Image: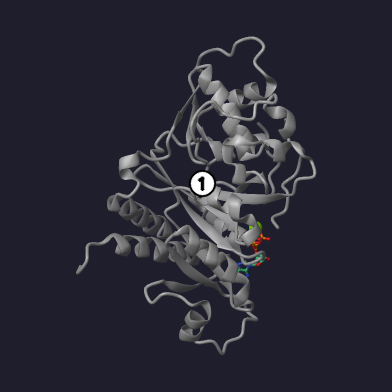
Amino acid sequence: MTGRRGGRPLVPAYLSTGGVARPSRPHLERLSVLTGTGTPAPAGLPAAQLALLDALDDGSLTVVEAAALLRLPVSAVRVLAAELMDRDLVLARAPIPPAERFDPDLLKRVADGLRALKHT
Amino acid sequence: MAFAPSSTPSDTRARRTAGASEDIHLPATARDLVKILVAGPFGVGKTTLIDSVSEIRPLHTEEPLSEASARVDDLAGVRDKRTTTVAVDFGRISLPGGVVLYLFGTPGQERFRALWDDIAYGALGALVLVDGRRIDASFDVLGLVEETGLPYAVALNAFPDAPRHHTGEQLRAALDLAADTPMVTCDARDADSSFDALLALVQHLIDRHAPEGR
Ligand SMILES: Nc1nc2c(ncn2[C@@H]2O[C@H](COP(=O)(O)OP(=O)(O)OP(=O)(O)O)[C@@H](O)[C@H]2O)c(=O)[nH]1
Ligand SMILES: [Mg+2]
């Protein structure tokens, strides 16, 4: 198994969601992109939500990147992100526009991109 | 947010990301985010392959094994401190043109099934790594990939002490591969070799979508 890369979670997973087990939004994918709206955080925002919001200060992150950064399971970040979305503090967008999911052109762009990188 | 570096960047990555810091925020050019699973049994080279091509030092999440079956609905497993977790690592490659490719190192044992389904959601396909010294260790993961319906290619990792008497055809037969499933040899420690394995998969994905008779 992959070596653990150090450190305890910044927020214990079992406390991180304040007991809320059900996100109020439909599915956030691992690769959904989270972006802060820039709205100032209200006083009294739970610490775990604040930690996620802070992580978005310097730019967008996918759900899975935020989870790695905060050392939380993806499921916990889904809940936190949904709560921040409800407060209009965070926007989420799907990893890829639905129409492009099965677009052959997308696969070509991936192949061309990989070839280009290989030759650098 | 501070990270303790877990390894020094390989030459390859240093070259590809010259001047890049450890900032993992998405590049502003990121538009279409796609993923490929790098799947295989323990110790087969998943992390090594991801590391050799990723622009960020591979990151990982600790996933409770009971989590994904409950999807987003149930954090009970997370609260139970005795819950087993598995580390799922991932890397990222920003391609020209706004496509960002994520690689998820996915353990292939049947008991990771629920987690597997969650990670596989929306994936383009899977690169299944096979260790020539223990082919049968990849049977589980091949079964999972096929059940999930993910298109895949097989990369045979070149471990030096692997038996040499296998021909490609014998290996294909042992793995029970379909005639059109690509199988390549790969050294996961080498970036170009890893890129070639990924390209074999992506070309296979393109060919599958090509209209009949072309
Ligand atoms: N010779 C050779 N060694 C390899 C190759 N790929 C990986 N290795 C070595 O095999 C060992 C295991 O590789 P990892 O990348 O950690 O394997 P993994 O699949 O991530 O393993 P788990 O995370 O434990 O499931 C490391 O010591 C690698 O250096 C390869 O293609 N050729
Ligand atoms: Mg690993």
Looking at this view, name the residue that lies furthest to the right: B82
User: Which residue occupies 60% across, 10% down?
Assistant: A42
Q: Residue at x 29, y 53 (%)?
A: A104
Q: Is residue B18 above or below residue B213?
A: above
Which coloring applies here? Answer: one colour
Query: Residue at label 1?
Result: B18
Q: Residue furthest bottom?
A: B165
Badge 1, how many Cα within 10 Å: few under 14, some, many 20+?
few
Q: Would residue A57 be seen by someone viewing this image from the given angle?
A: no
Query: Taking B197 as reference, is B29 above or below it?
Result: above
Q: Quadrant of ligand 2?
A: bottom right
Q: Is mark 1 within 8 Å of ligand 1?
A: no
Q: Is residue B88 visible?
A: yes
Residue drawn 53% across and 66% down? B143
Q: Quadrant of the N terminus of chain B?
A: top right
Going 30% across and 42% down the picture, which residue do you hit?
A99
**Quarter of the image where the C terminus of chain B is located:** bottom left
User: Residue placed farthest to the left in the image?
Assistant: B213
Seen from the viewer's position, the closer of residues B11 and B57 is B57
> What is the quadrant of residue A20 in the picture?
top right
Mark 1 belongs to which amino acid? Ala
Q: Is B19 located above or below residue B43 in the figure? A: above
Taking A98 as reference, is B105 left or right?
Answer: right
Image location of residue B211, percent across then percent down:
22, 62
Chain containing mark 1? B
The answer to whether residue A90 is left or right of residue A109 is right
Q: Secondary structure at mark 1?
A: loop
**Nearer to the camera, A1 or A114:** A1
- Across and down, in percent, residue B49 comes to 56, 61
Query: Residue B200 in the image: x percent, y percent?
Result: 40, 66
